[in-house]
Amino acid sequence: MTATTTVVINLPASEPVTLFKPEGDPGGIDQLATIVLEAAGRYDEYSDESAQFHRTQGWLGDSGEKYVKRAKRVALKAGRMRNTLKRTGRAVLACADRLRGHQRTYEEHVDRKRHLDRRLEALTAEIAAATNITIDQGKALQERADDLAVKYKSLVEDDRALARVARSNERLLAETLESANERDEVTDSSGGRPETALRAMQKPGSPMSGEATPEQVRAWWKELSNEERRAVIASYSHKIASTEGIPAEARERADRVRDEEVIIRLKEKAADGTITGEEADRLTKLQREADLEARERQGDKGDKDRD
Amino acid sequence: MPSIVVTPDVITREIRDWRKVVRLMKETEKAFAQASPAVLPPSVQEVGASFVQAWAGFAQESAEDADDVVTALEETLRDMTATDEQRAQQFTGLIGCGPGETFFTPPVVCEGDPAPPDLEQPTAEGGPAADRLAQRLGGQP
């Protein structure tokens, strides 16, 4: 008579049941940012023209004085509106970039889950077909099941993390747009700046006042949450790009956000025929650098794909 | 009394530049009006719609502001031209030409004047006919 032993293999569940998918169209959001930055370019032109109006020579007298006053007021208002649009456009561009990254992460999660599900299916089939297995064979099957369980758990955690950063990105985008759609806000220095960024810049050690030492700025940066860092990079890109004490990677990112905004704005002026010689030179230089960076990034991606 | 110096050329140039601003702002209004908030994540679409709608409105207001200046400048130019014409007619009367006869009316020749070889049409600067008027009125104060 042969003794039989039942071997129990605990199989993990395929999870998460539904992967978090970041919503929105990054290309479409880029286009929206382009509309915003092109508008900034037109307000720039408005402000420039108005500034020239109030330097008008050859019109003296009361009417001329009143005209100059009016042109000055208009130049100031248009300049402030341009600044709000620039800040908003930069923040929207940065949000689109992040969303693009989040959607790539989601695709990776889909691939990971598909791969794990295939392995789970194969293991399940193997167990179902197994007869007369030894204790050791049973242990080996359980180890494979445990390994799958660990990988599913890791995927669940990564999926939750993705949901967190994607929602934070959406909040930042909403705050940015909300801060620039009221009449008082569009001519205010806070226009186009999300609350998160404004609050972060009020904290001790921030580079806002220009008086903090690099050490104080370093400590300030360290205390910021990831959401606050993302907000200040997008909304204070000029400041962040040029402040010592902020990590090089963050400064480079701020630099890219700023350059991208300037390229779009100057392209609009070039298309409109209102670009100055100096601005045209700057556009050519920035465009060349951006193309080079894009080619380098493409090269890196190609290397990774081949790896 | 303040000095008053202005030429129609200055006003005309300002009008041209302000008209360009009006055009730029109208383009901006159109671009925002056509922007679609549907590209945004659903949780941001409502605020996105408010944003593009608000900016279409701001751009329209900016265009109207600039257009008001264009209108004021056009009126200024019209006033200047009309005043200049009226004064020219008034001075023509003072010079002694008959009623209803303007300085630029070809057949009129005032007594004692040498017969002009040709009476030129007025130009923006006044031309030789205006120079003669200036000579008759004496030097600038």
Image (cartoon, coloured by chain):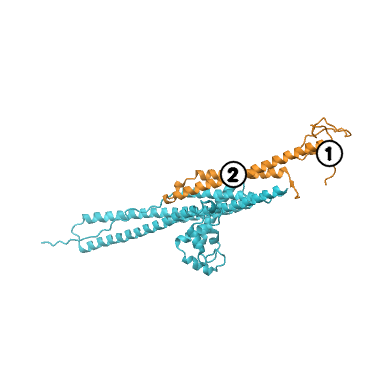
Chain colours: A cyan, B orange
Residue drawn at 52 percent across, 45 percent down: B32
The residue at which mark 2 appears reads as: B64
The answer to whether residue B13 is seen in the rendering is yes
Query: In the figure, is residue B118 to the left or right of A246?
Result: right
The residue at which mark 1 appears reads as: B132
Q: Position of residue A161 (x, y in %)?
A: 39, 59
Read off the chain for label 2. B
Closer to us: mark 2 or mark 1? 2
Mark 2 belongs to which amino acid? Glu
Residue drawn at 53 percent across, 46 percent down: B57
Give above or below for B121 relative to A177.
above
The answer to whether residue B24 is seen in the rendering is no
**What crowding class fits label 2: few (fewer than 14 Cα within 10 Å), some (14-19), or many (20 or more)?**
some
Q: Position of residue B103 (x, y in %)?
A: 80, 35
Read off the chain for label 1. B
Secondary structure under tag 2 reads helix
